[in-house]
Amino acid sequence: MRMAFDPTILVQYWPLFLQGAWLTIQVSVQAFLLGYTLGIAVALLGLMPGRLPRLAATSYVEVLRAIPFIIILFVIYYGLPFSGLRLPAPLVGTVALGLFASAYYAEIVRAGILALPRGQFESARAIGMSPLQAMRHIVGPQVARAIVPPSTNMTLTMIKESAVLSSITVPELTYQGLVVQGNTFAPFEVFAAVTLIYWGITIAVAGAARRLERRLGVAQARGVSRNRLAASYLLLERERAR
Amino acid sequence: MSIPALKVSGLTKRFRGVTALDSVYLDVARGEVVTLIGPSGCGKSTLLRCLTWLEEPDDGFIEVGGRPFGRTIVGQVVHRQTRREIDALRPKIGLVFQNLNLWPHLSALENVARGPVVVLGRKRAAVEAQARALLARLGLERQMDKHPHELSGGQRQRVAIARTLAMEPELILFDEPTSALDPELVGEVLGLLREIAATGMTMLVVTHEIGFAGGVADRIAFMDQGRIVETGPARAVLDNPTDPRLRAFLGRVLPSSLGVTA
Amino acid sequence: MSFQFAYLAGLMPNLAVAALVNLRLSAMIIVLALIGGTALTILRSLKIRPVNALIAFLISFIRGTPLLIQIFLFYYVLPAIGLDLSPTVAGVAAIALNSSIFISETMRGALITLDPGQIEAATALSLPRHLVWAKVILPQLFRRVLPVLVNEATIVVKGTALLSVITVVDVLRTAQQIASASYRPFETLIGAALVFLAINLTISLLGRRIEGRFAVQRA
């Protein structure tokens, strides 16, 4: 049993780790963009009047949140060829990850919109702003500030979940780690490196998010609606998504 | 006969079977200060909300300075105005909400300046200068760049009033201006309302401060169950209420505030 | 090839049986995580500097890295330094550790919301520390974190699906095995998805019912 830590392995294989990390980041960014766009659409759908839109949105969210991401991924990856489409693994992985994340983003956006007191919109309309102006100047900025912290939380979760893409041979960081480990039989060194890289990515993203929060003045926006906003925010923080 | 600042005819509003406003008639002359009093649930707030079309009345007409607002009648046909037409008249009807609804992500100055820039299309530089002057007149010289959560209740109240004044309204509606304040500040706000009244602004104030009603208002209107039951010169109504419901109401409310003139 | 509902229906009994593995493992993990999380919370409250520093390090690590990687660490790396665990044990340990950390963090957040007066009263009555925890703090804490715990349970259940990657024969691995024999991956995977849907929706609904009952009890 080898006990010695052999860093030369890492030196030899660092290009692979770097490639893997880079793909992890790319996939995450694309999945985030897809997921958030979808999430906003679903959130708005759920806020429309009538029972059907709300039912559709709720079902979408509940189903995607109850099923493990790996199964969502497999269903799309292994199921798609049967309808004629044969797409490359990274694309399927990105779409699946975005789909998965969209369910959580939808809830975050919805909660952010509902947390804003109706009076904010009304006072804007009462001085003559059009609904669009009210959205742009008063509602939008406040909702944006409210959704940044829970969105950060979910995005970090999504980045970590991207490791699962290794199971459909997407050559991201975890996959590269398994490849190197298969070549070198040095699990300790390999996973130490992979772990540290993931850790570094999440710390960097969390730090960037904090800076963004400060610039947006997240603390200031919580003046009037404090109780309702805090309540929903806390609920979302508690709902640790994976 | 001069055109009234506000003319309300037969305004009716029903909520799921409950009649909140029951054919309300009210005229407010230019420069007049009318106080609206009544027991809770009588429809005072609903009336104010209908007057800015935040609620759409089921029946009735509103005229602001002679211009129809929300609904017009041509001959026998009633037309609902377009959203644009309604929004165009809204700045003329100022509304100061009971809970103020200041915008927390904007500074006090920006709360006041945003409306004229976005809605009235004025140039920013001029608007900001006017906003500063307005806030200074209200005693907020050093609070202009602060955000609402950094301000005291009384200061927030003044920012809310400034925001409405900045839109150059023809009349201002006040929904319970003193209810959210500590008792010591009530006098301050009432004084402020007196000052605004003194500038000749037309005001319709919903309040439970009977002292204000007696001291500053020209007229008092008493509402009960969605109807304006009695209206008349302030002192007359308070000293000699005719309607028994008004008498009962004043009997309940007055002993503590009798003689208190703001 | 079109989707065959009949085939899917025929699969469900097999998948349901395989799902028992997930349920059994989830139950073990949740119990371990509750014990671990509570122990961690009590340990952190002792405010021993080096211990808390180590725990903070661990928390950052667990929260900053993927669960799959943590599972791989238990499965691939531990044998390399002498600790050879079966796939099931390694997987359960990894998920339990992960869950303990999150539960501890949640409890820490809830701890702040407790009324300090009660704890002061208990200490003033010379109640020994372990009784203060057992009789005063923990009961209230659990009532407060219950909704989060229910959510954590669904996360644990979903986590057990990952164990199929390290050869544990759970419902996902079973579905994959069936699929490779029958060449109908879509139906089998949808079947596995439905199983998890059923389990997690049931947990959420049960959770809401229990929450309601606890809320009524609270004075």
Image: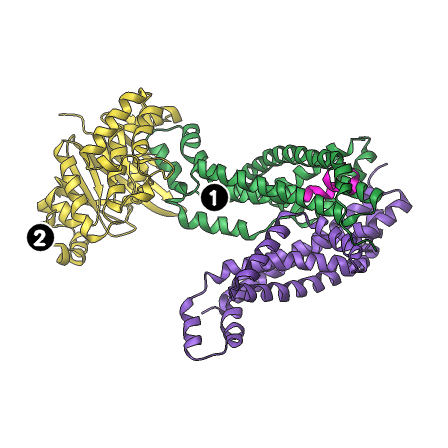
Chain colours: A green, B yellow, C purple
The quadrant in which residue A22 appears is top right
Q: Which residue is mark 2?
A: B259
Amino acid type of the residue tagged 1 in the rendering: Leu
Give the number of marks. 2
- Front residue of this view, candidates C23 and B22: C23
Residue C171 spot, x, y in % from top left: 79, 54
Confirm whether the magenta stretch covers residue A174. yes
* Residue B96 versus residue C197 in the image, above or below: above
What percent of the width, then of the height, locates residue B207?
A: 22, 46
| Label 1 secondary element | helix
> What amino acid is found at the position of numbered circle 2 in the picture?
Gly
Compared with C33, A53 (above or below) is above
- Evaluate whether residue C20 shows in this view: no
- Neighbourhood count class around disc 1 (C-alpha, 10 Å): few under 14, some 14–19, many 20 upward: some
Q: Is residue A195 left or right of residue A175?
A: left
Query: In this figure, which residue is indicated by the disc labeled 1?
Result: A114
Secondary structure mostly seen in magenta is helix
Q: Quadrant of the N terminus of chain A?
A: bottom right
> Which residues are the magenta region?
A160-175
Dot 2 falls on a residue whose secondary structure is loop
Q: Residue furthest bottom?
A: C126
Res B33 seen here: yes
Marks 2 and 1: which is nearer the front?
Answer: 1
What is the CA distance from the residue labelled 2 to the residue labelled 1? 45 Å
Q: Residue at x 73, y 55 (%)?
A: C160
